[in-house]
Image (cartoon, rainbow, N blue to C red):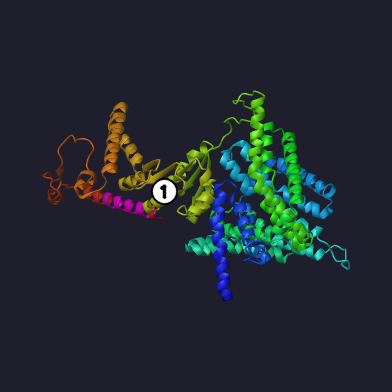
Amino acid sequence: MSVTNTELINTVALLATSIAIVPLFKRIGLGSVLGYLIAGCLLGPSGAGLFQDPDAIVHMAEFGVVMFLFIIGLEMHPERLWSMRKAIFGRGFLQVATCGALLTSAGIFILGLPKEVAFIAGMGFTLSSTAIVMQVLEEKGISTTPKGQRIVSTLLFEDLAIVPLLASIAFLAPTPENAEQATNWTAIGAGLVGVLILVAAGKWLMNPIFRMISRVHIRELMTAAALLVVLGSALLMELSGLSMAMGAFVAGVMLSESAFRHQLEADIEPFRGLLLGLFFMGVGMSLDLNLVLNNWLWLLAIVGLFVFGKGLGIYLVSLITRLPHREAVMRTAIMSHGGEFAFVLFAAAATAGVLSADHRATFTAAVIVSMLLSPLVVIIIQRLVNRRHKVNGENTANLEGIEFAENLQNSVLVIGFGRFNQIVCQALLARGVSVSVIDSNTDNIRSATHFGFKVYYGDGARIDVLRASGIAQADCVIVGVADPERTAKIIELIKHEYPLVPVFARTFDRLTAIDLIKMNVDFQIRETLESAFAMSRAALEKLGVSESEVDDVIEHIRTLDQERLNEEVLHGISAERSRKYWVAEPLVKPQCEAAALNEETAGLLEEMGENVEVVETIIDDEEEMQKLKEAQQNLEAHEESEVQAEKA
């Protein structure tokens, strides 16, 4: 069998195993990360032996971690960091520092590890699995509650902590005996220059490039530009002597306020997911199952010690920061395991010579076992807490730890920022509603900044862009684009992927309104309907009709229009119903018979089956005739400008 066929077989086996195992682990509540790890174990040297060099796979797949940190950087809005500063940099820092100190001390004084090894092992175990914690929060339905947000803020600091931890490995790495101990100012200077170049490029170069590419409307160019930013920043940091992950993170932070951040996240996400999954499989391949089986008692002792030490640290920090007892216990149960960033830290430490191969295999296995046991720990602690309350006779309606509905914010995703949605957003923002706006027109985005709006670049017809824009957490979505076909495509996509998210839409006419109603849109409004009612009201009031009568007339017309729309939705469009439903006709009986003003009009009406009397109107005054022609020309010019504006 040729080498090419062997590689193809291995690739197919890799994909097939991940597709078979990862969804299974996801379904039974163990998470996709564990699925990838187990799949790697089965294919690695200790399993089927299809891959004998897992380090090569891990090295290539490290770009998944680089892209992961880039996306984390994109989420680092200065406003968000400032509003969550106490939870992130207060409780988050205190938890990481406390747990890290406890686990490092346990490694030194109980396990007898060298200080550098104990520090790497302890700090690696301190970082919880974002994937597992978020899954538990989603299953419990508390991810958007205040207690859930407090956990997320701690995870956010842990994600930030990986950057200085990776940088610290350089100071822990052993130096050759004949190496000079003097400070390497050249290396420090190169690192600072690399960071300054990256910051300058992010501030003055990246956004103009993305604006230029967006005008071309070639989707793959935007994806290529996103990859160039991530990989280019990683390369720059590596050439400067710093970690690739740090470069990607800095690039993400520099673009966190960019109008293109949602589009960048959507373009990078597929590559990040695939490469990160491959990274976890590579880590699983690196797991020595013989070592696990031969040292299972020692391994379980490490896991038990680290889980207990980390849980103790989390509980103490929760009480110190005045969280309720039940929330402290919940945080301990959910976050007491190791996480995926430990693999990144262990791999970097092993490469730098801080960890030996045996240490890396042992600690990697310990983290994997802790992640595997994490769902069981949550279930056991939850049952113990419930049993304790039952024994003490506590009322199940106890309000301790329950969050009251106050200081809540609504979240609205607005797609399109033309004339229609600009007015909608003003009303929402005036009420203090949190609004996220995306648009694919760079001119709209640029003009919006003059009015204090923050609009992000993104194609609302792409599901990855919608996900990156936070549609899963949105209370409702408002679609206000001018193109009816595009509106229908966006709503069909949202209703298919997120059927429970309310969707409000602007429609062009009755036909598009019927199409959207059939798509189960929650609310639709024709763009000219209410303005026509307002004009009718103003005309009637000018003619001396009383306000109460005007209200009755408008409401009557509105009711008849809705009844007609309901019939059209039920019966659809057919040849026999075309004339009844779609020929323009008054909804109330006219007060006088219709009349044609000339023979040509009468002929047209006769072809349509209408027999009307011809009443010719003769205008003798040339000045009046000229005014009439000018009025007609002005009307046609106005209609043409409206059409051009809608197309724009």
Residue 279's image quarter? bottom right
Q: Residue at x 77, y 51 (%)?
A: 298
Task: Please state which of residues 531 and 567 is positioned toward the viewer in this rendering.
Answer: 567
Tell me the magenta residue range.
Answer: 631-645
* Residue 83 placement (x, y as % from top left): 65, 41
| Rendered position, 110 above or below 187 | above
Quarter of the figure with residue 360? bottom right
How many marks do you count on the picture?
1
- For label 1, the crowd category at 10 Å Cα-Cα, with few meaning under 14, some 14 to 19 and many 20 or more, is many
Q: Which residue extends farthest bottom?
A: 2
Kindly indicate the quadrant of the structure image that contains residue 19. Answer: bottom right
Q: Residue at x 46, y 42 (%)?
A: 500
In this view of the protein, can residue 644 be seen by the observer? Answer: yes
- Residue bearing the label numbered 1: 491
- At which x and y percent is residue 335? 68, 43
> Residue lying farthest front?
294
**Location of residue 116 in the rendering, given as x and y in whole percent from the top left corner:** 82, 55
